[in-house]
Amino acid sequence: MNEIDNYIQQFPQDVKESLLKIRGIILEQVPKAEERIAYGMPGYYLNKKPLVYYAGYKNHIGFYATPNGHERFADELSVYKQGKGSVQFPLDHEIPFDLILKIVQFRRDQVLNSSL
């Protein structure tokens, strides 16, 4: 097991399943993404640039699409608690995997286009 696997394994089964699904979305959309623990959470990098991060917490999953992934999806994210560069998806509600997919695709395209 690698450090991402170890990170995910520490959570209860329902949280673990959501974290694994987010991980799967990222790796499916960005198969060349580099996975590593950064800031104490799973982080994904493409062309050495940050793509997205996520983290499990007691009552929510944190998702971080810096630097501006949140700005592009402000309307869709407005129903969730947010901080600077972060959004919290409560565990007692359905996790918006389709929205996460769109954000990952957006960030992937941003990073790839900035590399040209």
Image (cartoon, rainbow, N blue to C red):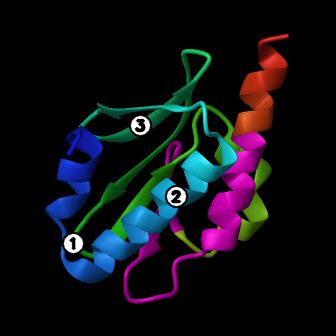
Can I make out residue 82 in this image? no
Query: Residue 1, image x and y in percent?
Result: 20, 46
Q: Report which residue position mark 3 lands on.
A: 43
Which residue is at the front of the view, 23 or 75? 23
Q: Residue at x 23, y 40 (%)?
A: 2
Q: Are marks 1 and 3 in contact (CB under 8 Å)?
A: no
Helix, strand or loop for disc 3: strand
Q: Give x and y (percent) for residue 7.
A: 21, 51
Instruction: Look at the picture and state if 107 lies above or below 93.
Output: above
Distance of label 1 from label 3 (alpha carbons): 19 Å
Q: Any mark on residue 58, and which?
A: 1
Q: Please tell me which residue is depicted at 28% across the width and 45% down the height of the picture.
A: 4
Toward the top, the furthest residue is: 116
- Label 2 CA crowd tier, 10 Å (few <14, some 14–19, many 20+): some
Mark identifier at residue 24: 2
Judge depth for marks 1 and 3 and give the one in front. Answer: 3
**Placement of 40 over or under 18, stated as above or below:** above
Q: CA distance from mark 1 to mark 2?
A: 21 Å
Label 1 neighbourhood size at 10 Å, few (<14), some (14-19), many (20+)? few
Q: Which residues are magenta?
A: 81-107
| Residue type, mark 2 in image | Gly
- Could you tell me if residue 74 is visible in this image? yes
